Image (cartoon, rainbow, N blue to C red):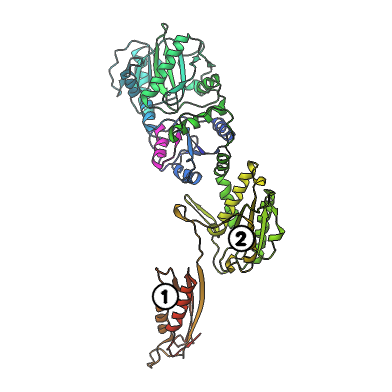
């Protein structure tokens, strides 16, 4: 599966910078660890900043899926760039553009970030949380709560602005700092003297609760987890004990409270619930982190290891948990070796290598092999020969010649088996400009990409997939490529017929259309050069003979009108040149006419009608 890791670290790539900036960062080491963990399970992984270019980057990395293929997924680590409810920004974008992602949605993030709303919801669901008050402006009345109190911003995370206060003066000082730095209301809540435990959650309906993890603060500083502690600036060493040294009864109680809090806010996939426990064993929810840190040494990953998930297995399980939620799997599969499913393995081999396939297409479109370019054709055939030899396909001299076609087969041969037939040449004339490779979210462009290159690359990777499962040499299978499609296979037709008669099934490699349709017919083209010549005339001279250019243009207009949507024919002039002497009107017009058709008889009929249209004039016509 294609997985994009979205994070916020350095980028300020937004239209305007304003509002409260994000102060949370994911470390490069953590991002790399997640990337390596996902790659270990054969996912295709890239990482992007969650900025204004996110949609374009995702559209390029994971375009609309193929039939039967799972969509790509985002592994969301984004804390946002700026503004309010920053955790919701990337999930909101992903919801809009239709990309599945790991973690909670915008609603759950917004509820969890607003600590006051979260506490109200906890209370409504009978979940314990400390008493609290909200200070909305600088001239507040002191709340009627007993000291000590905890003061923190109403809508921030990772312990930003948190402080213990013991007097009203300290309360007012701390509140003024929060009003000034964070420009938002202040949450004041009862300080619970005691121990702090975290419970990590993984899964859905209901989630699995990890063993509680206790934070040990030591004797220095306040018994709360501050931003200075998280950033390593506090000067003290914080320890985590997992499982927390509490009774089995309290362990199960803490897990139950965490699961109920997770469900109350509508979280998905993962979260961490922070609680305090007083001397009597009463538990109180402080907050729920809907985007728990996946730092390798954080409490969430420590607790995951306690239940047997190492870091790679944890990130893999998070992806499988989200996949189950989006795609209907009853539950994520256990991390055990599965029985081999050949069809699934072959399909996975192809879909996991879409990037390789696109790079191979780009490489092939740069390899010129037009019908009238024998040197380019030979180089292209040699390139294909090297690729098939690498896959361990062998040349069949009986159905090969240097002039028109080459054939390869598996060790089992292709008699009574399957033969794939494709053409190497691109039926374009030398004067037609080369179309360079370019990629758009839903389309690939490049010379010959539809009629020749895409079928060739698809065949190559199908053969590689068979070889990866040790199936290729056991199958009676052949590949024939010819290089005179633009000449109606006049030189290779005999060999193609003879080789096809040996196989039981023959697949012609050609372009397809929308809705799984197949293109089974190639349009023909005829080019005509029309020359109409008369006597040189002076401007303004009046005689019975019309001007050459005016007469010619009327005839070209009539010839173009021979196009027929019903007959699927198209006729038009593609180039017009005139010859003239100084001071005289043009006396000769030369036009290049192009006819495109499906039915040769219709083309012959148009050719006869052109001859009729040109009869009867006083000009020399060739």
Residue 225 at least partly seen = no
Depth order, front residue of 120/317: 317
Residue at the spot of label 1 = 560
Local packing at callout 2 (Cα closer than 10 Å; few below 14, some 14-19, many 20+) is many
Cβ atoms under marks 2 and 1 closer than 8 Å: no
Disc 2 to disc 1, how far (Cα)? 33 Å
Q: Quadrant of residue 560?
A: bottom left
Residue 182 coordinates in the image, percent (x, y): 38, 28
Which residue is painted at 54% across and 59% down in the image?
Answer: 451
**Within the magenta stretch, is there residue 539?**
no
Q: Is residue 146 left or right of residue 329?
A: left
**Residue 240 shows up from this direction:** yes
Was residue 96 drawn as part of the magenta stretch in this picture?
yes
| Residue that sits furthest to the bottom in the current view | 543
Q: Is residue 584 above or below residue 86?
A: below
Span of residues in magenta: 86-101
User: Does label 2 or label 1 sit earlier along the sequence?
Assistant: 2
For image coordinates 34% across by 19% down, the residue present is 122
**Secondary structure that dominates the magenta span:** helix
Residue ID at (44%, 16%): 255
Relative horizontal placement of residue 319, taking residue 368 as reference (left or right): left
Q: Is residue 377 above or below residue 354?
A: below
Q: Position of residue 335 (x, y in %)?
A: 56, 28
Using the image, tell me which numbered label, if any, was put on residue 424. 2
| Image disc number at residue 185 | none
For this orientation, the residue located farthest to the right is: 397
| In the foreground, 154 or 412 | 412
Q: Position of residue 190 (x, y in %)?
A: 36, 13
Query: Circle 2 sits in a helix, a strand or a loop, which is it?
Result: loop
């Amino acid at each position: 599966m294609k997985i994009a890791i979205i994070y916020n670290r350095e980028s300020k790539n937004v239209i305007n910078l304003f509002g409260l900036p994000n102060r949370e960062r994911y470390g490069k080491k953590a991002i790399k660890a997640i990337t390596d963990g996902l790659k270990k399970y054969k996912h295709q992984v890239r990482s992007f900043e969650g900025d204004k270019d996110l949609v374009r980057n995702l559209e390029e990395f994971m375009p609309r899926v193929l039939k039967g293929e799972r969509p790509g997924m985002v592994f969301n680590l984004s804390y946002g760039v700026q503004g309010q409810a920053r955790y919701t920004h990337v999930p909101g974008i992903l919801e809009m553009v239709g990309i599945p992602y790991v973690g909670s949605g915008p609603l759950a993030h917004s509820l969890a970030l607003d600590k006051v709303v979260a506490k109200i919801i906890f209370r409504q669901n009978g979940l314990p949380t400390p008493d609290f008050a909200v200070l909305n402006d600088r001239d507040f009345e002191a709340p009627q709560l007993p000291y000590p109190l905890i003061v923190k911003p109403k809508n921030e995370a990772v312990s930003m602005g948190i402080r213990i206060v013991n007097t009203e003066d300290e309360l007012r000082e701390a509140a003024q700092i929060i009003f000034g730095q964070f420009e938002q209301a202040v949450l004041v809540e009862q300080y619970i003297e005691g121990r702090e435990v975290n419970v990590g959650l993984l899964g859905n309906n209901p989630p699995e609760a990890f063993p509680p993890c206790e934070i040990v603060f030591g004797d220095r500083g306040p018994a709360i987890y501050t931003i200075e502690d998280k950033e390593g600036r506090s000067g003290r060493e914080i320890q985590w004990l997992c499982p927390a040294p509490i009774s089995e009864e309290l362990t199960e109680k803490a897990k139950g409270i965490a699961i109920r809090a997770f469900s109350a806010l509508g979280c998905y996939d993962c979260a961490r619930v922070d609680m305090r426990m007083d001397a009597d064993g009463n538990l109180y929810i402080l907050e729920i982190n809907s985007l728990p840190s996946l730092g390798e040494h954080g409490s969430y990953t420590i607790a995951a290891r306690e239940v047997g998930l190492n870091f790679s297995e944890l990130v893999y399980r998070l992806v499988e948990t989200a996949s189950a939620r989006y795609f209907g799997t009853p539950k994520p599969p256990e991390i055990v070796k599965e029985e081999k499913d050949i069809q699934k393995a072959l399909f996975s081999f192809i879909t996991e290598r879409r990037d390789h396939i696109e790079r191979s297409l780009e490489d092939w479109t740069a390899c010129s092999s037009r019908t009238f370019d024998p040197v380019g054709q030979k180089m292209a055939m040699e390139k294909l020969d090297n690729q098939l030899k690498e896959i361990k396909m062998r040349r069949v001299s009986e159905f090969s010649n240097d002039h028109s076609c080459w054939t390869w087969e598996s060790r089992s041969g292709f008699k009574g088996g399957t033969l794939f037939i494709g053409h190497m040449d691109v039926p374009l004339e030398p004067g037609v400009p080369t179309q360079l490779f370019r990629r758009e979210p839903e389309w690939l462009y490049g010379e010959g990409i539809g009629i020749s290159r895409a079928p060739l690359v698809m065949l190559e990777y199908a053969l590689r997939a068979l070889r990866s499962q040790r199936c290729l040499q056991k199958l009676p299978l052949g590949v024939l490529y010819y290089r005179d499609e633009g000449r109606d296979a006049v030189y290779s037709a005999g060999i193609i017929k003879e080789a096809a008669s040996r196989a039981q099934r023959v697949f012609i490699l050609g372009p397809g259309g929308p809705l799984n349709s197949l293109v089974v017919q190639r349009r023909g083209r005829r080019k005509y050069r029309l020359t109409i010549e008369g006597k040189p005339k002076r401007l303004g001279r009046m005689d019975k003979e019309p001007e050459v250019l005016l007469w010619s243009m009327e005839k070209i207009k009539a010839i173009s009108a021979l196009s027929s949507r019903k007959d699927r024919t198209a006729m038009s002039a593609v180039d017009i040149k005139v010859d003239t002497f100084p001071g005289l009107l043009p006396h000769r017009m030369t036009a290049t006419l192009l006819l495109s058709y499906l039915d040769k008889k219709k083309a012959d009929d148009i050719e006869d009608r052109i001859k009729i249209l040109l009869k009867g004039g006083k000009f020399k016509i060739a």
